[in-house]
Image: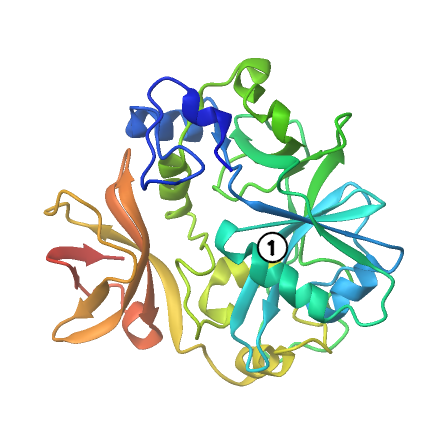
């Protein structure tokens, strides 16, 4: 569904049919505002799912990587759904208001996540709904009025069972709003970052009501790169396991929780081995005007070392990219890479 935000002056889409603006005419300035005094971003293309029923958290706890049975009302977190072999299939951000668990995920993954949840419902008394037509997500920066996230440290290998508290690995503090939506502080851009769920009919008026300038998706995505925050399906592939993306492991996986699909792989890699690849941020030399495409090869000498995910021009650091690289290559800080003709380093 096309956002009313696209009617704003200067709104530009990256591809025909996109639902949110790529930028509003000055993407570097939009980044600077988002990282500095604050700005608001339309993320209305995200899919919004709800899970209701008294057993919703226990049920989601049994299916996902996150410890959810102790998630309090007014709090959020993240979760992953893994394949039987431990590969990342779905990712969602979470908020529970005491009656409903809200899940927001990438537009391309909404049908997949909903379908999986529907198939796994069996006789559990929960209801799953796609409410994207009625609700929209916006994200803004520059507001630290909510308590910052509460993160558990990632434990060392072969830690003793029972040493991690039985609670989500990250707790995002938030609150329900009078409109029926919520606010949730995630700091996912490495600065005070707040997601707000609002009725879709009210979404386009958020900038005026908040007094914040608008920034496009370009600014938001480029600021994810130095924070090494991946988008599943863009910065990951069908072979990605949680340990390959440190932010996913830290925020969406409780390492002392068992009995979910793919848990054996998570435990084995954490206790006995190292992941075959690592998600890292790269600085490119800027010799190419345009950022590399998603999926572009990263070469170390004559050999392919990995692939590029999100890439773009940072307002301070120049051309940057997220890349999923072979671990033995990524661990060497002196390696110089070639990315579509540009030289790159960690």
Residue 191 shown left or right of residue 128 in the figure: left
Which quarter of the figure has residue 332? bottom left
Residue 328 shown left or right of residue 335 in the figure: right
Image position of 124 with respect to 1: above or below: below
Q: Quadrant of the C terminus?
A: bottom left
- At mark 1, the secondary structure is strand
272 or 307: nearer the eye?
307
Residue 181 placed where, x, y %? 72, 34
Instruction: Decide if residue 254 is in sight here.
Output: no
Residue 172 placed where, x, y %? 67, 45
Residue 168 placed where, x, y %? 71, 57
- Residue at 40% x, 24% y: name it: 33
Residue 125 shown left or right of residue 74 in the figure: right
125 or 138: nearer the eye?
125
Instruction: Look at mark 1 in the image and give the residue it sits on.
Output: 92
- Residue at 54% x, 23% y: name it: 204
């Amino acid at each position: 569904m096309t956002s009313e935000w696209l009617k704003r002056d200067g709104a530009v889409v990256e591809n025909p049919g996109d639902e949110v603006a790529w930028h509003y005419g000055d993407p570097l300035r939009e980044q600077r505002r988002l990282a500095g005094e604050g700005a608001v971003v339309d993320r209305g293309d995200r899919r919004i799912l709800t899970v209701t029923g008294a057993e919703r958290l226990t049920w989601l706890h049994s299916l996902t990587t996150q410890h959810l049975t102790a998630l309090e009302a007014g709090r959020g977190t993240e979760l992953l759904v893994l394949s039987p072999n431990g590969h990342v299939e779905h990712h969602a951000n979470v908020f529970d208001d005491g009656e409903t668990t809200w899940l927001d995920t990438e537009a391309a993954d909404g049908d997949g996540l909903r379908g999986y949840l529907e198939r796994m419902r069996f006789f559990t008394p929960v209801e799953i709904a796609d409410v994207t037509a009625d609700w929209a997500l916006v994200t803004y920066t520059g507001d630290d009025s909510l308590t910052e996230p509460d993160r558990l440290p990632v434990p060392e290998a072969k830690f003793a069972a029972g040493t991690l508290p039985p609670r989500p690995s990250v707790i995002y503090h938030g609150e329900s709003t009078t409109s029926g939506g919520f606010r949730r502080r995630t700091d996912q851009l490495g600065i005070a970052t707040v997601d707000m769920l609002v009725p879709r009919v009210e979404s386009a008026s958020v900038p005026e009501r908040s007094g914040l300038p608008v920034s496009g998706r370009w600014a938001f995505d480029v600021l994810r790169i130095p924070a090494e925050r991946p988008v599943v399906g863009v910065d990951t592939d069908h072979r990605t396991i949680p340990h390959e993306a440190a932010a996913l492991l830290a925020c969406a996986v409780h390492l002392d929780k068992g009995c979910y699909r793919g848990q054996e792989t998570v435990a084995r890699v954490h206790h006995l081995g190292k992941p075959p690849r690592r998600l890292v941020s790269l600085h490119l030399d800027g010799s190419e005007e345009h950022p590399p495409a998603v999926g572009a090869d990263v070469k170390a000498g004559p050999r392919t070392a990995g692939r590029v995910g999100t890439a773009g021009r940072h307002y301070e650091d120049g051309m940057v990219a997220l890349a999923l690289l072979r671990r033995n290559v990524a661990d060497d800080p002196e390696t110089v890479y070639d990315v579509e003709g540009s030289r790159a380093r960690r």
